[in-house]
Image (tube, helix red, strand yellow):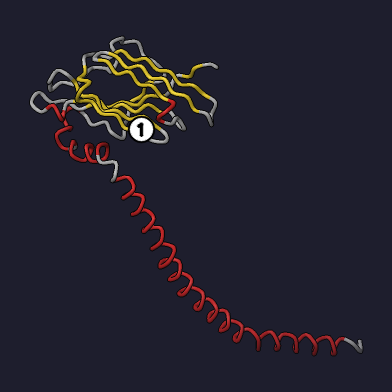
Amino acid sequence: MAQVTPEVLWAQRSSNTDPEKNFIYLTISVPDVPKENLKLDLQPTSLTFTGHSETLKRTYHLELTFFAEIDTAESKVHHTARNVELKLRKKELNDEYWPRLLKDSKKVQFLKTDFDKWVDEDEQNEAPEDDFSQFGGMGGMPGMGGMGGMGGGDFSGIDFSKLGGGDMPGGEEEEEDSDDDDMPALEGDEDDKEEKAASKAPA
């Protein structure tokens, strides 16, 4: 079975004083790959991933050589039904961003910037707490789903009922009023037509 290189999204933060703010975000897109079907080998300068999806009949394989070293002991992995997410601690504290993720400067098609997590180097101090909560606190995701469900319920239960209860009666009244106004005129028109027809009949 042929191996497929999965799409990889990445972003980063940097700090020369706080290791918690000096890391790489990495998301490997491998839908329907259960934990028992994946193998992840994380080294200070490289990452090797292999995973198999029974439903998609597809085997994913990925090998990365990092631009600089990471601290494997302080790095974290989170597996979801669609992705394998990693937060890789940079070994060297440095305010400057890595110029790229990989040691080789050659561009690869499967590697893309994760714009949902990316923050410009000069603006990163304004955002790290939000980013940490989104990544580390995965319990926030069900909470977001719950909020979405509640919002959907409110929208369907209240807004639509208001629309249905407000517009329909008004529309019916308007139609009834217009019918009442038009009916005599229609009868008058019919009488006029009958009189004209009768006057023309002898001729």
Q: Residues within 10 Å of mark 1 (few under 14, many from 20)?
A: some
- Image point (15%, 20%), residue name: 96
Looking at the picture, does residue 145 appear above or below residue 66?
below
Which x, y percent locates residue 10? 31, 26
Q: Which quarter of the rendered picture does the C terminus lie within?
A: bottom right
Three-letter amino acid code of the residue under disc 1: His
Which x, y percent locates residue 35? 40, 30
Looking at the picture, does residue 1 appear above or below residue 187?
above
- Residue furthest out toward the right: 202
- Image point (32%, 45%), residue name: 141
Looking at the picture, does residue 94 appear above or below residue 81?
above
Residue under label 1 = 79
Which x, y percent locates residue 6? 43, 23
Residue nearest the viewer, comparing 44 with 173:
44
Q: Quadrant of residue 81?
A: top left
**Element on which disc 1 rests:** strand
Q: Which quarter of the rendered picture does the N terminus lie within?
A: top right
Looking at the picture, does residue 78 appear above or below residue 50?
below
Which x, y percent locates residue 48? 35, 16
Q: Quadrant of residue 102?
A: top left
Task: Left or right? Give the position of 7 relative to 13.
Answer: right
How many numbered badges does the structure rendering display? Answer: 1
Task: Left or right? Give the position of 88 relative to 34.
Answer: left
- Residue furthest out toward the left: 17
Task: Left or right? Give the position of 166 relative to 15.
Answer: right
- Image point (37%, 24%), residue name: 8
